[in-house]
């Protein structure tokens, strides 16, 4: 499990034969789970200046492979004794989104992110979402997109400030929304989806 709070901007040294080599200050251990741009991967080899991670066929079929070059968001898995911040993140990417527009405001920047409408039902106004591994709050939700408002601190400490219109993003929707929608859709009324009010109420219980 992760929190969506980026611990380091690491660097991709190379990607070949499904093996991703990362240069990082983090001292990883063999078998550790580490999220790279929001993707949970397993450490298979440790180097003096980083570590190797292996990508499965399933991972490569879902994520944006363009995210495996240059600088990347890195977060090691949360430990049981860690302080919990951000929100519950699995590191399981649901879909690829695209930056549709970027609008500077007085003390923040609005990003409109477009995605397949199929995933909109898991995105809740004022709920949590993970973008390239970063825990963020959704402001508004539309038919095939949603709006984020990013403060200057987040732009400085992550790679979001480098995004442009057309940038592809790894998106992980809200864990609880997905679970509850699955339970309801496989219950007595398979056509019923969870309403935003119901999701917000359930989230408030955690």
Image (cartoon, helix red, strand yellow):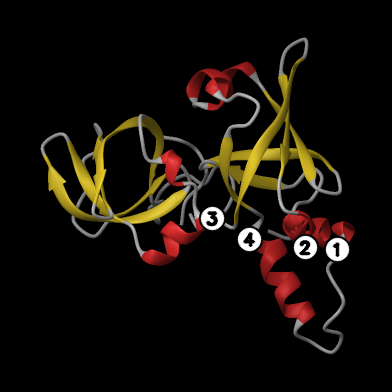
In the rendered image, which residue does mark 3 sit on?
A: 93
Position in image of residue 190 (x %, y %): 82, 83
Q: Which mark is residue 175?
A: 4
Pick whichever, 74 or 200, lies toward us.
74
Q: Residue furthest top?
A: 106
**Mark found first going from the N terminus, 2 or 4:** 4
Q: Is residue 57 left or right of residue 190?
A: left
Q: Secondary structure at mark 4?
A: helix
Q: Give the labeled residue for mark 1.
A: 198
First along the sequence among labels 3 and 2? 3
Comes first in the chain, label 3 or label 1? 3
| Marks 1 and 2, how far apart at CA | 6 Å
Residue hosting label 2: 202
| Vertical side of 99 occupied by 181: above or below | below
Which mark is nearer the camera, 3 or 1? 3
Residue 150 versus residue 81: which sits nearer the camera?
Answer: 150
């Amino acid at each position: 499990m992760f929190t969506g709070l980026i611990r380091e901007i690491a660097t991709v040294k190379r990607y070949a034969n499904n093996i991703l080599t990362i240069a990082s200050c983090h001292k990883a251990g063999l078998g550790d789970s580490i999220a790279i741009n929001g993707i949970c991967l397993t450490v298979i080899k440790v180097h003096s200046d980083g570590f190797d991670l292996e990508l499965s066929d399933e991972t490569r079929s879902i994520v944006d492979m363009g995210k495996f070059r240059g600088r990347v968001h890195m977060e090691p898995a949360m430990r049981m004794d860690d302080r919990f911040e951000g929100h519950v993140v699995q590191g399981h990417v649901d879909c690829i989104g695209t930056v549709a527009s970027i609008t500077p405001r007085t003390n923040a920047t609005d990003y409109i992110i477009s995605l397949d409408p199929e995933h909109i039902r898991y995105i809740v106004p004022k709920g949590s979402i993970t973008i390239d591994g970063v825990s963020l709050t959704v402001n508004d939700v539309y038919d095939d997109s949603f709006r984020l408002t990013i403060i200057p601190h987040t732009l400085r400490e992550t790679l979001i400030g480098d995004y442009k219109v057309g940038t592809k993003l790894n998106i992980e929707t809200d864990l609880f929304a997905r679970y509850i929608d699955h339970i309801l859709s496989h219950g007595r009324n398979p056509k019923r989806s969870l309403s935003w009010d119901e999701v917000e109420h359930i989230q408030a219980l955690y």
